[in-house]
Amino acid sequence: MVKRRAPRKRPPVREPLPTPTRTEVGADGYDYEVRPVAAARAIKIYRCPGCDHEIKPGVAHVVVWPTDSSGGVEDRRHWHTPCWTNRATRSPTRRWS
């Protein structure tokens, strides 16, 4: 007589939580979509348009794009979180304009 094993229980599949996106009104009167990027998910180097310094891998930051943009990926910009928060008190760099 052959004993059958009980089927293995598989761990539940964890879906990644959706990243919350918020809409902010800029000093220029335009609406922007703002999405935070966790440090663990930041794997590339970007250039912040607020300070013109690099955002290194492993640094939490935000991705920002105009809500009325039809360009999609080309219109997204990665900002240091403090640079985006304080953008009204400083002028943009050449890369953003």
Image: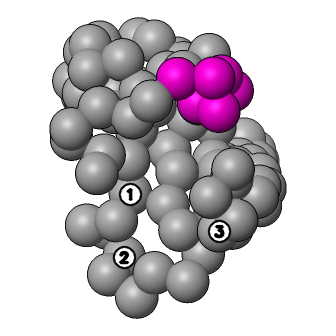
Q: Name the N-terminal-most of marks 1 and 3.
A: 3
Q: Name the N-terminal-most of marks 3 and 2.
A: 3
Residue drawn at x 21%, y 41% as measured from the top left: 95
Q: What residue type is labelled 3?
A: Tyr
Q: Is mark 2 on a helix, strand or loop?
A: helix
Disc ID at residue 72: 2
Q: Quadrant of residue 68?
A: bottom right
Q: Quadrant of residue 87?
A: top right
Residue nearest the viewer, comparing 57 with 33: 33
Disc ID at residue 30: 3
Q: Distance between the residues labelled 1 and 3?
A: 15 Å
Magenta stretch, main secondary structure class: helix
Nearest to viewer (mark 1 / mark 3): 3
Q: Classify mark 2: residues with Cα within 10 Å, few (<14), some (14-19) or many (20+).
A: few
Q: Is label 2 in contact with label 1 (beta carbons under 8 Å)?
A: yes
Q: Is mark 3 on a helix, strand or loop?
A: loop
* The magenta segment: 85-90
Q: In this view, does 65 lie to the left or right of 31?
A: left
Q: Which amino acid does label 1 sit on?
A: Arg
Report x, y in % for residue 82: 62, 16
Q: In this view, does 56 lie to the left or right of 39?
A: left
Residue nearest the viewer, comparing 86 with 23: 86
Q: Give the residue number, with chain letter if any, for mark 1.
A: 76
Residue drawn at x 21%, y 38% as measured from the top left: 94
Q: Quadrant of residue 75?
A: bottom left
